[in-house]
Amino acid sequence: MLAGFKVDVSHQEQERILSEVEAWYSTAKEQAGVEWLPLAGIKNFLFMDLGYEDEEEFEDAIHGSFEDFLAAFPHFEVKQIEGKAMLRIADAALAPSRPQKLTLRITSSQQLLDTTLLKDGNADLELPHLEFEIRPIAKRQIDTL
């Protein structure tokens, strides 16, 4: 399980935060050619856009600092550069990858609720024992099984 999903934030909120951060990063890299992006502007935009009163309320909602929240996801790299929190997204995370099959053994019904996954928009999700399948929908999804 990804450490970022252990944060007690709704899956929809996580998805929205990650999507916004990735969009900001992609735009900045594409238009200005920057590799490292300051987090302060993104954080200010997000807490206002998501309806939080201020930065403190936003960080209360994600149960920690924005930097720690992002650093919990493997495709984000967060570090201090000249005293500023900066973000870089691994190029491999933004590029399509070759197909792979992952298998998860479910041993209890509680595991279906406790396991969170990040499904790429081009991926199929199959639960053959339940005769259940989610086809690609061209948009990434974060949800419990």
Image: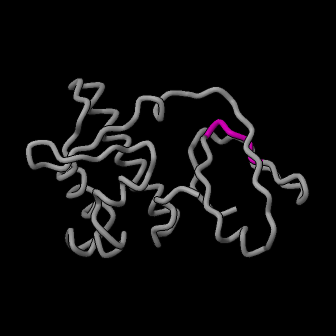
Residue ID at (41%, 56%): 72
Q: Nearer the viewer, residue 37 or 102?
A: 102
In this view, 100 is above or below 18: above
Q: Is residue 74 left or right of residue 98?
A: left
Percent of width and height locating residue 27:
30, 33
Quadrant that contains the N terminus: bottom right
* Quarter occupied by the C terminus: bottom right
Kindly report the secondary structure that dominates the magenta region of the rendered protein. loop
Residue at image point 31% right, 38% down:
88
* Residue 101 x/y as whole percent: 74, 38
What percent of the width, then of the height, locates residue 3? 49, 59
Residue at the (58%, 51%) spot, across then down: 118
Residue 120 in the image: state x and y as whole percent: 60, 42
Side of 101 relative to 21 (left or right): right
Q: Residue at x 51, y 62 (%)?
A: 5
Confirm whether the magenta stretch covers residue 66. no
Of residues 139 and 43, the one drawn nearer to the viewer in this rendering: 43
9 or 108, which is in the foreground? Answer: 108
Colouring chosen for the image of the structure: one colour
Q: Which residues are magenta?
A: 121-125
Residue 64 location, quadrant = bottom left
Where residue 117 sits, quadrant-wise, is: bottom right
